[in-house]
């Protein structure tokens, strides 16, 4: 099963794909970032994200698209813009007929590290360890997207174990 994790944004959209071979074996397939220029009008940035997501989905051919749920404390303008970008990302998955799942940052931290209040460096080091990587995926947004994909495999494994 191929799981494509997406860390939404409008300047940078992180992505990371893993192959979930069995309940214990995960393999990193690809990672990176979709970027848009702050010099472009916002609608053009959304259109660019959509087109690049459609291309990414056609290239990776994921079975599941996992997108982070939004959580903002302070900046409402940023939250609204990221929410719009997230909508474009979800639309690209929906139009590609891919199963989609969503997780909060707390759920990702819990699944990856076992501790819901883990700090970013701890999550990243655990991602590196789980996937047996020499270096962390960069930029951070890509590493966050890989963590989302791992989160899906961990939650699904727990659910399957609970059903048997």
Image: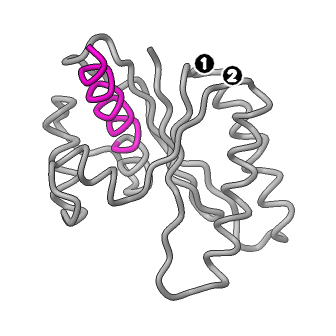
**Which residue corresponds to mark 2?**
58
Q: Can residue 154 be found in the magenta stretch?
A: yes
Quarter holding the N terminus is top left
Q: Can residue 162 be found in the magenta stretch?
A: yes
Q: Are marks 1 and 2 in contact (CB under 8 Å)?
A: yes
Label 1 to label 2, Cα distance in Å? 5 Å
**Label 1: few (<14), some (14–19) or many (≥20) C-alpha neighbours in 10 Å:** some
Q: Residue at x 35, y 18 (%)?
A: 20
Q: Residue at x 33, y 50 (%)?
A: 108
**Which percent across, then down, holds residue 116?**
22, 60
User: Within the image, what quadrant is residue 97 found in?
Assistant: top right
**Label 2: few (<14), some (14–19) or many (≥20) C-alpha neighbours in 10 Å:** few
**Which residue corresponds to mark 1?**
61
User: Within the image, what quadrant is residue 75 found in?
Assistant: bottom right
Q: Nearer the viewer, residue 80 or 13?
A: 80
**Which percent across, then down, holds residue 23?**
24, 16
Q: Horizontally, is 62 left or right of 135 in the view? A: right
Q: Residue at x 55, y 19 (%)?
A: 63
Say how many tags the image has: 2
Q: Horizontally, is 53 left or right of 74 in the view? A: right
Residue 25 vs 13, above or below: the answer is above
Report helix, strand or loop for mark 1.
loop
């Amino acid at each position: 099963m191929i799981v494509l994790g997406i860390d939404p944004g409008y300047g940078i959209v992180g992505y990371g794909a893993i192959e979930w071979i069995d309940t214990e074996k995960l393999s990193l397939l690809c990672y990176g970032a979709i970027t848009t220029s702050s010099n472009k009008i916002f609608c053009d940035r959304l259109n660019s994200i959509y087109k690049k997501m459609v291309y990414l989905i056609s290239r990776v051919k994921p079975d599941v698209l996992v997108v982070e749920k939004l959580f903002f404390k302070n900046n409402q303008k940023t939250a609204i813009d990221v929410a719009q970008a997230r909508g474009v990302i979800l639309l690209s998955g929906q139009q590609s007929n891919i199963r989609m799942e969503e997780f909060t940052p707390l759920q990702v931290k819990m699944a990856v590290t076992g501790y819901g209040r883990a700090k970013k460096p701890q999550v990243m080091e655990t991602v590196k360890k789980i996937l047996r990587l020499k270096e962390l995926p960069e930029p951070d947004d890509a590493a966050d997207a890989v963590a989302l994909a791992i989160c899906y495999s961990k939650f699904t494994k727990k659910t399957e174990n609970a059903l048997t």
